[in-house]
Image (cartoon, grey):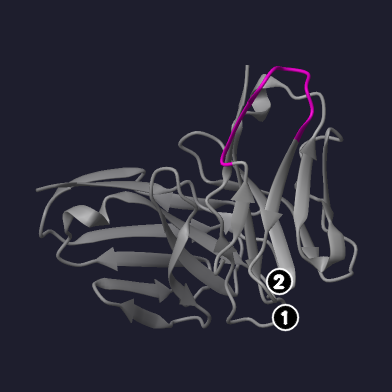
Amino acid sequence: GAGVSQSPSNKVTEKGKDVELRCDPISGHTALYWYRQSLGQGLEFLIYFQGNSAPDKSGLPSDRFSAERTGGSVSTLTIQRTQQEDSAVYLCASSLWGSDDQPQHFGDGTRLSIL
Amino acid sequence: GQQLNQSPQSMFIQEGEDVSMNCTSSSIFNTWLWYKQDPGEGPVLLIALYKAGELTSNGRLTAQFGITRKDSFLNISASIPSDVGIYFCAGRYNAGNMLTFGGGTRLMVKP
């Protein structure tokens, strides 16, 4: 597709379980970002990938959160031993890195609910 | 860390009225972006600003990048019901950096 694709769109799981969220960026975009949005709040940066460089993990809230980007394209955000405070919408964005006039384009997010 | 203060938090206006919202930052940004988010969807880019003092329009929307690089505003003229949604400002220091978001302005339009 033409835009950023995220799956699943909704995920409900029990506290303590692990979850994986997937992001397919726009084809050709070298930069990929993960954000978290709590109900009624702005977006909070989690992690970003640029090409083969080491990712910027400075926004990850705890070591239960990790992310990978395979082959410079698809990314997976993993949350281990989920807690209720992890409930949020997780948004992925991509852009052409290195060019100042290329803003980030967002997917529709994964709504995660921890019971 | 950097913080963006966005105001107002919400607005309830009559169709046809003009709307203004703004963001201020504790530190400078080199890019300001304005996004609109509808329920269940990701933010959609409205306007991007890349130079201090820049004034850019997109239809009924006008946004400005403050001279100090610490603020930006978004105006919507002659509002219509489909303008309803949450508007977010976002700042970026360098190309490729993550975005720092404001808390959003929820706009409600009364027909």
Residue A46: horizontal and vertical position, in percent? 72, 48
Q: Label 2: few (<14), some or many (≥20) within 10 Å?
A: many
**Distance between the Cα atoms at labels 2 and 1?**
6 Å
Any mark on residue A32, and which? none
Q: Residue furthest front?
A: A1
Viewer-side residue, A74 vs A57: A74
Q: Chain of mark 1?
A: A
Confirm whether the magenta stretch covers residue A17. yes
Q: Is residue B53 left or right of residue B101?
A: left
Viewer-side residue, A19 vs A58: A19
Residue B73: horizontal and vertical position, in percent? 37, 65
Viewer-side residue, A108 vs A86: A108
Region in magenta:
A9-19
Q: Label 1: few (<14), some or many (≥20) within 10 Å?
A: some
Residue B82: horizontal and vertical position, in percent? 23, 55
**From what the image shows, is residue A86 above or below residue B55?**
above
Quarter where residue B22 is shown: bottom left
